[in-house]
Image (cartoon, helix red, strand yellow):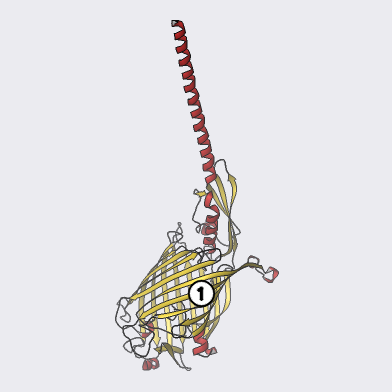
Amino acid sequence: MPSTRIRTDYFETHWLNCLKKSMFSLLLVGISIVCICSKSYSQQEKLQVLDIIVIGNKKTKARVITRELDFKIGDSLQLQDLSERFERNENYVINTGLFVDAVLTLIEVDEKDGRTKVQLSVKEGWYIIPVPSFSLADRNFNVWWQQHNHALRRVNLGLIFVHQNFTGRRDELKVTLQSGFTRKLELRYKYPYLNKAQTLGIETGILYSNNNDVRYQTLDDKGRFYRDTMQNIFERFRTNVGFVYRPSLFYQHRFRMEYKDLNIDPSVLELNPIYFLNNSEQQQSIRLDYSFTADRRDNRFYALNGYVLKLDVAKEGLGIFNDVNIFTLTASFTKFWQLSEKLSVVGSIKGHRAFARDPQPYHNYRALGSKSNLVRGYQLYLIDGLDYGYVKADIRYRFLDYTFNLGKLMPLKNYRALPIQAYLTLFTDAGYVNEPFFDDTNVLNNTLLWGNGVGLNVVGYKVHVGRAAITRNRLGEWGFVVGTEFAF
């Protein structure tokens, strides 16, 4: 019996050890499987970028193009959102205005090691644009057509030479020769990449112009003009230099200094002695300007998603010439929402505050009424004041999205595929202009401005926009507005 007891203990101990070894082995196998699966899952989740290869760029430097991407060599791309990220980056490239198309693809994918190369295929636009220029002297088409009876003498004709990619580094050279209502000679140059990191740029320009017709007063919220057919009555000389700091794709700082020398004929001062204040025939000033832009739009020419924030601080008049003392702060914010494939919404707000509260020269006294500062429905009116603000809201429905094949009708091969999008829009605007030196010759300042309407927006090549709208304001007036915005 004792020997039997010893054998039973032996078997119990033996099988217990075997069981422990088996469980330990299964645990090791399980850990190995988990590790292998984890490694495989990791490989499927992201890929490291070994290289970015640009093709199709005949003029533009590759490093200028890859500067616009939100990833670089050595970064990892999450496969889960790769399609969305590539589409977003293709828009970043198109946003430069240098290309009509951009396509990102993965090539030479190594799934085992989780590595890949990225190919960026671009179609360059036409960088050299020598075009005849036709522009209206008035603030918009409606003012020219209705208030000035579409007079041809209020038309500017000339030649604009633009090179958007002068050295292949996205530097822009623009020369304008113009005759007509305003005779003008202007030269501008922008070079965005002074340093190796491609974050610092410079811009400069010089302009001379003259007129024999000048707006000398605002009466009944409309500009009044004086004309002398025998001589020039207004001359302008301007030169500026600025630096642009762009630390990332979405944020930009601009510092600019500008010198202006303006001269007016004494006959204008007889009509408005405060055109330059103190019955002066000349105004000289130095202007310092700082602006900040945060731009997260998917397309800066016609956005459907994202936002853009702009801040601007300007001081004109540094006590050197004592002709002007203007200190202003301007801020704007626009947000874009794409609610569905075809429906999108835009909301924007803008405000302008003048810190120098003294009466300003009439020439520098501007608020709402220009193309960039307009409550829709009031396109016929010029509303002067020290401060202003407005809000806008648009609902847009895309009813057309088609790419036309122009074939041999278009001699430029990269432009033969013409993508067109058309949007029906509903909008409403509200604004206010503060005029502390109010007089009864103008009635639209110091009161709520409100307008709405329906419009049509057409986008070509993703960068050129044409607009037309029917408007109505709080005065019960109907209007029709047309306009174009080109990427050059």
Q: Which quadrant of the view contains residue 125? A: bottom right
Kindly tell me whether residue 69 is visible in this rendering. Answer: yes
Residue reaching furthest to the right = 408
Callout 1: 10 Å neighbours few (<14), some, many (20+)?
A: some
For image coordinates 49% across by 63% down, the residue present is 305
- In percent of the image, x 50 and y 24: which residue is there? 22
Residue 181, can we see it? no
Relative depth, front residue between 122 and 4: 4
Tell me which residue sits at (48%, 82%) in the image: 472
Identify which residue, 364 or 80, lies in the foreground: 80
Q: Where is residue 24 drawn, in percent x and y? A: 48, 26
State which quadrant residue 2 falls in: top left
Q: Amino acid at mark 1?
A: Leu
Expressed as whole percent of the image width and height from the top left, the position of residue 261 reads 39, 81
Name the residue carrying label 1. 426
Which percent across, then down, holds residue 21? 48, 22
